[in-house]
Amino acid sequence: MKVGTAEAGPGETATGHRTVTELPVGGSEDLPVTVLNGGETGPTVWVTGTIHGDEPTGTAVIHGLSERVDVAELAGAVVCLPVMNPTGFRTASRTSSYHGDDPNRYFGRDDGSKTPPRVQQVICDRIYDDIRATADALVSLHTSWVATHPYTIQPRVSYGEDRSVSDAAVLRDRLIELTEAFGLPVVNQFPPDETETRDLQHSLSGAAVADGILAFTPELGGRLVVERDVVAAAVDGVWNVLHALEMVDRPADRHPEFAFDRDGDLRRFDGPHTDVAGIVRYRATEGDFVEAGDVVAEIVDQHGELKSEVAADRDGYVLSRRERAAVYENDVLLDMAVPDDDPLLVESE
């Protein structure tokens, strides 16, 4: 199997680079690639990290996974892209430096525009062509705000003109199997209308699922720093995905320390919002369960005097505290996981 300059025969490991664009003053932008090609046939799984340059945990997970996999005992292939956004990684920035674009909003995008695509879309198109040609499954490793409880985003699956209900149901059920195998708390994606508003259908996992690839997005704690316990859990998580796909014989450990205590489907939710400007002091932290009406934050003025108490809108778990002390009117304070009343199988418009 070959990706860029990394070419591995059966039972071989190869490292190299995938050139994605030229640079203005010479040289090229090269993505590091590791190909782990098993000695037996089986599925091909892509594992990607650091598509947002300030999210280095995915890189560490991929390094750990590459060290663990013995290709002689692997059925199928694992393709690793540890740094998807080299320019953002070099500057510890979420976006790429070409035009300040979010790289994770350019996959599967074909809007029919006659205007030539910006370089970030060109790069994403080239990578995604490689993925779409070979991938049976994809794990897109991310992190969230600085203060974040690790979790996995479960995508919704659409049916309609391009996919029958029965085929969509098979894809949904297989995705549930893989996200549960990964082992972190599972939080369903935003409802379809909000997913579209946020342009998440053009994220890497969003585009891949639309193309029938088993893809999901773990959020591995906070950005900018690498947390060793989360890395260990995620390496085991990817290994258990390989086990669920019958690519390795033995499962890895589970990590119950990250589990939520309550049953039932959860989904992503941003809230509550503050109705006044000021300085935020949180009462809730990541991983906490809060009930609607519980005070989760206080807003004080520049002298420390209380201006407002902010209560949770809904029952649910705190996934993240937003990483700023100064807030304006209507700013979101928390990312949450709340009960999900929407189906994972949705009809496309």
Image: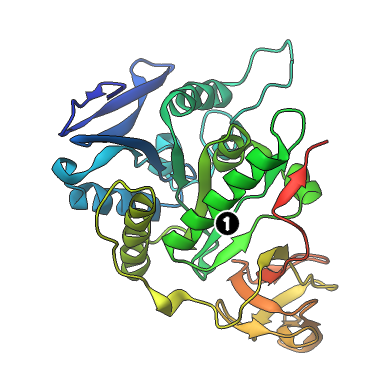
Above or below, 338 relative to 190: below
Residue 288: give x, y in percent of width and height: 59, 82
Q: Is residue 176 left or right of residue 246?
A: right
Q: Is residue 20 left or right of residue 34?
A: right
Quadrant location of residue 329? bottom right
Quadrant for the N terminus in the image: top left
Disc 1 residue type (three-letter): Ile
Q: Nearer the viewer, residue 63 or 180?
A: 180
Residue 318: give x, y in percent of width and height: 62, 75
Above or below, 23 relative to 49: above
**Residue 303 visible, this orientation:** no
Q: Nearer the viewer, residue 339 or 218?
A: 339
Question: Looking at the image, which residue is at 39% across and 16% down?
Answer: 25
Name the residue beneath numbered marker 1: 153
Q: Is residue 340 left or right of residue 29?
A: right
| Most distant residue in the front direction | 166
Above or below, 219 relative to 275: above
Q: Secondary structure at mark 1?
A: strand
Quadrant location of residue 30? top left
**Residue 214 visible, this orientation:** yes
Residue 108: give x, y in percent of width and height: 61, 28
| Most distant residue in the top direction | 114
Question: Looking at the image, which residue is at 20% across and 27% down?
Answer: 8
Q: Residues within 10 Å of mark 1 (few under 14, many from 20)?
A: many
Quadrant for the C terminus in the image: top right
Q: Nearer the viewer, residue 95 or 292?
A: 292
Question: Looking at the image, which residue is at 80% across and 76% down?
Answer: 313
Question: Looking at the image, which residue is at 51% across and 33% down?
Answer: 97
Quadrant location of residue 104? top right
Residue 5: give x, y in percent of width and height: 25, 21
